[in-house]
Image (spheres, rainbow, N blue to C red):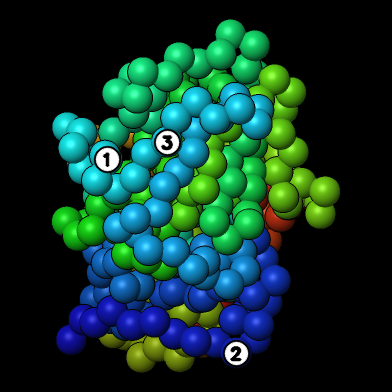
Amino acid sequence: MQRRQVLSLAGAAALARWLPGCDQLVVLDPEAHGATIDPFTPNDVFYIYKYSQEPDLDPATHETLIKHEDTVLGSFDLAMLEGLASREKEHTLECIGARPTIQNIGNALWEGVPLTELLDALGIEIPTSAVGLRLVGKDGYHAGIPVEDLFDGPVWIVWRMNGEALPFEHGAPARLLVPGRYGVKNLKWLEEIAFVDTPHVSYWTPKGWSEEATYQPNTLIVSPMDGMKLEANLPTRFVGTAFAGRDPVVKVEARLDGGAWEEVDVEYVSSSPDTWVLWSYAFTPTEGDHTLQVRCTTASGARSAEDPAGTDQFHGYDGSMQISVSA
């Protein structure tokens, strides 16, 4: 029987509380045999970004200000957003602190519009002197992005998630999706969106985390879990994710017990950009210990690092995850 569960591993959960954008460990399906991953992560198990305490606001009446530096150019609320011609956008989010033990990544079908369309609806022109945006949440969190992201992404503002009103814990009344950049740039509970004439330094940057926060190629093994005891001679299906943001994953490979790399089955590839790839690998274990490592290659030729731990956690996990199992 297949099932989706949220596992709370004490050590990993404790570590997660100290990582930006991470506060829970989500394993989408820990079944050892015949496991699957839903291409669209249900809202109730989608990882949660929580910088501090959730803000005190009413999504129905909350107002977001749009500024140039500290001058207010306009504002909007949920009623105004709901009057726009929204569209669906499939999009994957991953926490910059994600890693094999904290798999904070999820894919959803959001509904909203590019931020430039909201600006047009409000009659707001992008100031010619602006080089970036200062994004501030009602919870006090803040981040900066280049003004070019408005067009290169483009940045979206969304207020629905997987066919439902955006849940409060995911940023209601509306949040931003910033293609190509980790979750630390995808603000929730928007209090202000301000054009700035000098780049805004994000909250986590002075603490050592990447200011650019661009996605790195990475692979994660969701099931089975590291250290799991398998039944000898019983076919087992390994499943996981591969993601690299704007640079689509075109190949996923695995190697068993340190042997040669071989291409694995791709279970899900979306026609939408900025989405994950889901893969699977069939293996019938013999008695003894085994290792499995998985890597991905992108359209540009970039590849997840061979080191399962990655190369620089402060720029986002870029490793090729490896697990050990026994039978």
Q: Where is residue 216? Give x, y as percent.
A: 58, 42
Q: Which residue is mark 2?
A: 10
Q: Residues within 10 Å of mark 2 (few under 14, many from 20)?
A: few
Circles 2 and 3: CB distance less than 8 Å?
no
Q: Which residue is mark 3?
A: 75
Q: Which mark is residue 81?
A: 1
Q: Vertical placement of 35 versus 172: above or below?
A: below
User: Residue at left 73%, top 52%?
Assistant: 204
Q: Residues within 10 Å of mark 1 (few under 14, many from 20)?
A: some
**Front position in the image: 106 or 118:** 118
**Front position in the image: 28 or 169:** 169
Q: Where is residue 138? Give x, y as percent.
A: 54, 56
**Looking at numbered disc 1 in the image, what kind of residue is underneath it?**
Leu
Label 2 sits on a secondary structure element that is: helix
Whole-angstrom CA distance, mark 1 to mark 2, is 40 Å
Dot 1 or dot 3: first in sequence order is 3
Left or right: 228 with respect to 198?
left
Is there any visible trace of residue 162 in the rendered image?
yes
User: Which callout, 1 or 3, points to the residue nearer the camera?
Assistant: 3
User: Residue at left 52%, top 66%?
Assistant: 55
**Looking at numbered disc 2 in the image, what kind of residue is underneath it?**
Ala
Q: Where is residue 80? Give x, y as percent.
A: 26, 39
Q: Where is residue 267? Give x, y as percent.
A: 25, 54
Dot 1 or dot 2: first in sequence order is 2
